[in-house]
């Protein structure tokens, strides 16, 4: 990298993250057209993504807030992570194990009743 590029990234670190995210999503979008047998099939797939294909949403309502909370844990400041760890350490081993079992049970309750088909079957 040139010094100018490094200076720009240091001054605008969010620009690097946004650039990476835009590139990733563009490649994923282009991959639809790459793997589809025709432009019409790619269009039908994209229409299904944006219209839900007329189906009822399969995930329970709680999944999306939980995903958002999980994503937020990745950007918490170090002092907030340390405070959370210290708070959990204060509960003791039995309570921490119980919390993990409750979370695991919630995950199992929200899981689909059958496994998803193998996604690369036709590739």
Image (cartoon, rainbow, N blue to C red):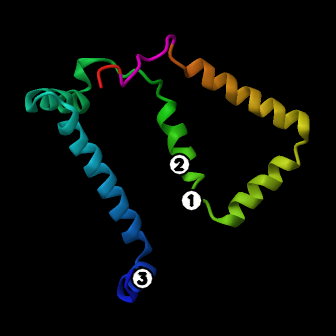
Q: With 115 as the anchor, is 33 left or right in this view?
A: left
> Can you tell which mark lies on residue 48?
none
Image height check: is 65 above or below 112? below
Q: Residues within 10 Å of mark 2 (few under 14, many from 20)?
A: few
Q: Which residue is mark 2?
A: 71
> Can you tell which mark lies on residue 6?
3
Q: Residues within 10 Å of mark 3 (few under 14, many from 20)?
A: few
Q: Residue at horizontal 69%, vertical 30%? A: 103
Q: Earlier in the sequence, mark 3 or mark 1?
A: 3
Please tell me in which quadrant of the rendered image residue 122 appears.
top left
- Which percent across, then down, holds residue 96? 83, 37
Magenta segment, principal secondary structure? loop
The front one of 47 and 56 is 47
Give yes or no for contact between labels 2 and 3 (Cβ–Cβ under 8 Å). no
Query: Magenta region: which residues?
Result: 113-120
Q: With 88 as the anchor, is 71 left or right in this view?
A: left
Q: Residues within 10 Å of mark 1 (few under 14, many from 20)?
A: few
Q: Quadrant of the N terminus?
A: bottom left
Q: Secondary structure at mark 2?
A: helix
Please tell me in which quadrant of the rendered image residue 36 appears.
top left
Q: Quadrant of the C terminus?
A: top left
Q: Secondary structure at mark 1?
A: loop
The front one of 64 and 18 is 18
Q: With 40 as the anchor, is 30 left or right in this view?
A: right
Q: Residue at horizontal 44%, vertical 17%? A: 116
Q: Nearer the viewer, mark 2 or mark 3?
A: 3
The front one of 50 and 122 is 122
How far apart, in angstroms, are the residues tagged by discs 2 and 3?
27 Å
């Amino acid at each position: 990298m040139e010094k100018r590029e490094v200076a720009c990234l240091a001054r605008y670190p969010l620009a690097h993250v946004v650039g990476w995210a835009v590139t990733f999503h563009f490649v994923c979008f282009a991959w639809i057209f790459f793997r589809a047998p025709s432009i019409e099939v790619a269009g039908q797939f994209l229409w299904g993504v944006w219209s839900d294909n007329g189906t009822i949403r399969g995930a329970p309502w709680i999944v999306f807030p939980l995903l958002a909370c999980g994503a937020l844990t990745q950007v918490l400041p170090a002092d907030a992570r340390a405070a959370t760890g210290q708070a959990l350490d204060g509960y003791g081993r039995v309570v921490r194990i119980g919390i993990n079992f409750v979370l695991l049970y919630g995950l199992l309750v929200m899981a689909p009743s059958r496994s998803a088909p193998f996604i690369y079957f036709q590739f």
